[in-house]
Amino acid sequence: DQQVKQNSPSLSVQEGRISILNCDYTNSMFDYFLWYKKYPAEGPTFLISISSIKDKNEDGRFTVFLNKSAKHLSLHIVPSQPGDSAVYFCAASTNAGNNRKLIWGLGTSLGVNP
Amino acid sequence: NAGVMQNPRHLVRRRGQEARLRCSPMKGHSHVYWYRQLPEEGLKFMVYLQKENIIDESGMPKERFSAEFPKEGPSILRIQQVVRGDSAAYFCASSPSGSSGNTIYFGEGSWLTVV
């Protein structure tokens, strides 16, 4: 049972345009959400996170939006750059019992065309 | 300020041998996590450790797999009597102690190939 779903396996955008990566979740107990970027043969790199008490968090070109009623979050990258081409993972966790186990989506492969 | 260090980066083992993967967390981090990524699959949680304690091992296979994080030295993920299905990328991550948000930082991974 996939608690965190990234329904688009891949996405292609033009350099300079906006990239929107989507993530849906089913567990209403999740209270913290993270986005990671991963290049081939490397470990995931943390990008940005959001707590469930917020609906938006912004860091430079990256903005994450959270819609708790829809159990949906999205990552916006603007403007997109060729170096953003990577696999993006959405992850969620609860803080119950101080256990920081992350539940991961399967990833969306973003390609940014020059 | 070194990040999470994993070694070896690549390991080849014959079926039936043992594999040991090591992870040194970021400086000041006392929480270590191991994740596995099988070919064509997403990251799957295996185990969460603090110094000398296993906090959550719900993602560990019941047999052949063990993990430790001793008081001194790196965390070790040990796989005994490896089989071809153990071939995967194993990622270690760490986070600081205390309530600093649930952000964890990953190493570059160890790729295990069982032949």
Image (cartoon, helix red, strand yellow):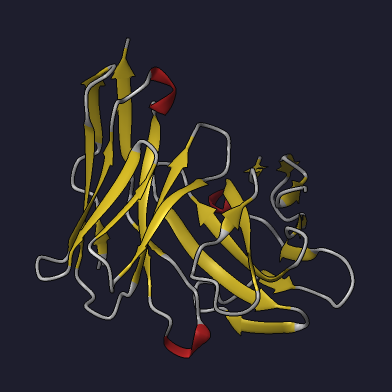
Q: Is residue A2 visible?
A: no
The quadrant where residue A68 appears: bottom left
List the single residue furthest toward the left. Answer: A70
List the single residue furthest toward the bottom. Answer: A97
Residue at point 66%, 82% (across, down): B54
Q: Is A73 placed left or right of A107 in the picture? A: left
Residue at point 57%, 43% (across, down): A43
Q: Is residue A96 above or below residue B91?
A: below
Q: Which x, y percent locates residue A93?
A: 39, 71
Q: Is B28 placed left or right of A64 in the picture? A: right
Q: Is residue A96 above or below residue A8?
A: below
Q: Which x, y percent locates residue A27?
A: 23, 75
Residue at point 51%, 63% (across, down): B103
Q: Which x, y percent locates residue A73?
A: 22, 56
Quadrant holding the C terminus of chain B: top right
Q: Nearer the viewer, residue B31 or A49?
A: A49
Q: Is residue B74 above or below residue B12?
A: below
List the single residue furthest toward the top. Answer: A114
Q: How many marks?
A: 0
The quadrant where residue B12 appears: top right
Residue at point 58%, 72% (across, down): B47
